[in-house]
């Protein structure tokens, strides 16, 4: 071990012959241990031995045994180790962030790989660093978002391909290829979750309902078909729309604008009829006419006893799905072209049924029906029509641009497909 004096008469101890690792003010401390200290500025310019300084507390002429014990204790204290030179601990010299940016001993990483701080170009180094942070932030999300994850995989594929090009490391290119495959798989998973067909250029149609929500929609429609308290189309439409409002709690808010939009001039009579048969309960001292006068800021809260949670319930879904189904039905019933054609309740019910029972390509009927349209008697039962009257209302839907040309009802089946503009409302059979 070498020692010497620095600027300002400071004494330094060099533990590696390459740099200063500790400083002791002259006259303020001592170097102890079992060896000698060499001073480079010894008299004569040479290096000569200097006796070790006695341990603190030793007095000349004192007890030699006590002095020996003190020296042994001093010798047993581990000597300070020199700090590793940059690069000697396997970490690139510039890879350690300091200050508030990163804790001591940490460095930028992505996919379990260290990002060297001297990586060029700088834009690549920054992208890799930010990408690692983005993946870690995604892992902390309370809910997964596959669309976001797919984009992260895309970024990773591009960044690692560039990294491989810069460094010539084939393993980086392999990682880039895996990231590209992961992006595609994740995107397909997200599309399947939402029922969105994916083409070469990405999603073809943005759907309002997912496949699971489409199943719930069909369950609600079947419940209305079988259990509607009144057979007429006007009542069935009101029952469907109010059921979707009250599906979770048994109660729901309606306004006069809602009722008039669904039923036009028949709203008061239909609402009163549903109340008279006990399917619907209005608040105390509120009449059907009062409900028609209610405004959005003060809606009327109606109760459907069969949907109250304490009763056996026909279906179960969360509040997000309830809101999505209600919004879907409202979009169908309030379709601009249907309103322009003055479509009545039966025609609007047929629009709802065909949308809910169509495949992603818009064709009516699912695999359980052989993909050959819909059973005409079931369609008629839901819409409050006779089977022979369905064709007339299907023609009105063609005129309104809801169904494409080529609809037919031969063989007791309703065959056809949704118009392209209606595909976002498909129930995704």
Image: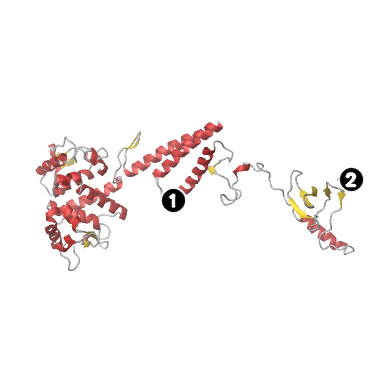
Q: Residue at x 39, y 43 (%)?
A: 147
Q: Residue at x 36, y 43 (%)?
A: 190
Q: Secondary structure at mark 2?
A: helix
The answer to whether residue 219 shows anywhere in this view is yes
Mark in front: 1 vs 2: 2
Q: Which residue is mark 1?
A: 141
Q: Which residue is mark 2?
A: 44
The answer to whether residue 378 shows anywhere in this view is no
Q: Is residue 344 left or right of residue 6?
A: left
Quarter where residue 69 is shown? bottom right
Q: Residue at x 52, y 43 (%)?
A: 129
Q: Residue at x 40, y 41 (%)?
A: 186
- Residue 43 at x, y percent in the picture: 88, 48
Label 2 neighbour load within 10 Å: few <14, some 14-19, many 20+? few
Q: Is residue 224 left or right of residue 186?
A: left
User: As rendered, which of 389 and 329 lies closer to the eye?
Assistant: 329
User: As rendered, which of 284 and 123 lies closer to the eye?
Assistant: 123
The earlier-in-sequence mark between 1 and 2 is 2
- Residue 210 at x, y percent in the picture: 30, 46
- The answer to whether mark 1 and mark 2 are in CB contact below 8 A is no
Looking at the image, residue 162 lies above or below residue 216: above
Residue extending furthest toward the bottom = 285
């Amino acid at each position: 071990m070498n020692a010497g004096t620095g600027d300002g008469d400071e004494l330094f101890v060099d533990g590696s012959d390459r740099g200063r690792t500790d400083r002791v003010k002259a006259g303020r401390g001592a170097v102890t241990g079992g060896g000698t200290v060499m001073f480079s500025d010894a008299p004569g310019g040479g290096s000569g031995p200097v006796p070790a300084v006695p341990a603190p507390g030793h007095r000349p002429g004192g007890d030699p045994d006590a002095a020996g014990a003190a020296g042994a204790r001093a010798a047993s204290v581990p000597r300070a180790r020199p700090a590793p030179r940059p690069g000697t601990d396997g970490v690139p010299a510039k890879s350690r962030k300091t200050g508030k940016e990163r804790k001591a001993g940490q460095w930028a990483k992505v996919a379990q790989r260290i990002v060297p701080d001297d990586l060029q170009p700088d834009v690549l180094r920054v992208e890799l660093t930010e990408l690692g942070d983005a993946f870690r932030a995604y892992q902390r999300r309370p809910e997964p978002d596959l669309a976001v994850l797919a984009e992260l995989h895309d970024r990773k594929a591009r960044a690692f391909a560039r990294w491989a090009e810069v460094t010539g490391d084939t393993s980086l290119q392999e990682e880039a290829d895996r990231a590209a495959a992961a992006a595609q798989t994740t995107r397909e998973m997200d599309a399947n979750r939402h029922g969105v067909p994916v083409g070469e250029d990405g999603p073809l149609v943005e759907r309002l309902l997912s496949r699971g929500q489409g199943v719930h929609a069909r369950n609600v429609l079947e419940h209305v078909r079988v259990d509607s308290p009144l057979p007429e189309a006007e009542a069935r439409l009101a029952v469907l729309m109010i059921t979707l409002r009250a599906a979770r709690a048994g109660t729901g808010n309606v306004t006069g604008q809602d009722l008039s939009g669904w039923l036009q001039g028949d709203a008061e009579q239909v609402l009163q009829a549903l109340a008279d048969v006990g399917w619907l309960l209005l608040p105390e001292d509120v009449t059907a006419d009062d409900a028609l006068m209610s405004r959005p800021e003060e809606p009327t809260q109606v109760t459907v006893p069969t949907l109250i949670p304490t009763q056996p319930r026909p279906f179960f879904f969360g509040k997000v799905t309830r809101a999505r189904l209600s919004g879907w039905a409202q979009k169908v019933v309030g379709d601009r072209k249907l309103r322009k054609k003055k479509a009545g309740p039966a025609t609007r019910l047929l629009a709802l049924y065909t949308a809910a029972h169509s495949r992603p390509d818009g064709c009516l009927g699912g695999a359980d029906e052989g993909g050959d349209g819909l059973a005409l008697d079931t369609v008629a039962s839901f819409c409050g029509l006779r089977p022979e009257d369905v064709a007339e209302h299907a023609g009105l839907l063609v005129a309104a641009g809801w169904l494409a040309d080529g609809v037919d009802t031969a063989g007791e089946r309703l065959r056809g497909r949704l118009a392209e503009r209606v595909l976002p409302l498909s129930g995704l059979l």
